[in-house]
Amino acid sequence: TPTAEESQASPQQQQQQQQQLPLPLSIPTPQSIAAMLAVPTDDGSASSRGAFCDASSGSGSGSVVGGSSELKRRNRCHACKKRVGLTGFECRCGGTYCPAHRYSDKHDCSFDYRSHGRHEIRKANPQVLSSKVDRL
């Protein structure tokens, strides 16, 4: 039952009181944690996922398997397949490389630096043309 003071409170004060209330937090269950940490096997299915991920996400296993294969590519050097961990270097050609292969001349880089540089110079320095003067 609202009191007389609460009924006379302005809508702004009521909104402030509602914003100060703590929001309920969702606590992860062991099943949801297992679904997030699932590792796919060689046949494409996840070993520990089971029905947990299918019931929670509803999107199927295709996106999870594709996401984990991208993680594998990021963790290994594209040239020598050595694990790079957090020290991997992203190249403009799209690969991740170890410190030995991070420069474009150390791996077979497919990125065209020459045309990229020409494009950047052309964009930074537009050609200025003066108007032509008619001679008498």
Image: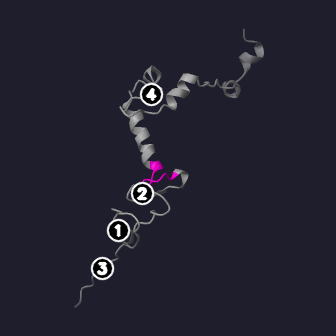
Counting residues from the start of the chain, the first of labels 2 and 1 encountered is 2
| Residue kind at label 1, given as amino acid type | His
Magenta region, residue range: 74-84
| Residue kind at label 4, given as amino acid type | Ser
Residues at badges 2 and 1 in contact (C-beta under 8 Å)?
no
Q: Which residue is mark 4?
A: 47
Counting residues from the start of the chain, the first of labels 4 and 2 encountered is 4
> Which numbered dot is residue 119?
1
Q: Is residue 86 above or below residue 117?
A: above
> Which numbered dot is residue 131?
3
Q: Is residue 48 above or below residue 91?
A: above
Of the two numbered discs 2 and 1 in the rendering, the one whose residue sits closer to the viewer: 2
Residue that protrudes farthest toward the bottom in the picture: 136
Q: Which residue is mark 2?
A: 80
Residue that protrudes farthest toward the left in the picture: 136
- Towards the viewer: 125 or 35: 35
Q: Write the residue at 43% across / 59% down.
A: 91
Residues at badges 4 and 2 in contact (C-beta under 8 Å)?
no
Counting residues from the start of the chain, the first of labels 4 and 1 encountered is 4
Q: Is residue 4 left or right of residue 70?
A: right
- Secondary structure type for disc 3: loop
Counting residues from the start of the chain, the first of labels 4 and 3 encountered is 4
Residue 79 located within the stretch drawn in magenta: yes
| Residue kind at label 2, given as amino acid type | Cys
Of the two numbered discs 4 and 3 in the rendering, the one whose residue sits closer to the viewer: 4
- Secondary structure type for disc 4: loop
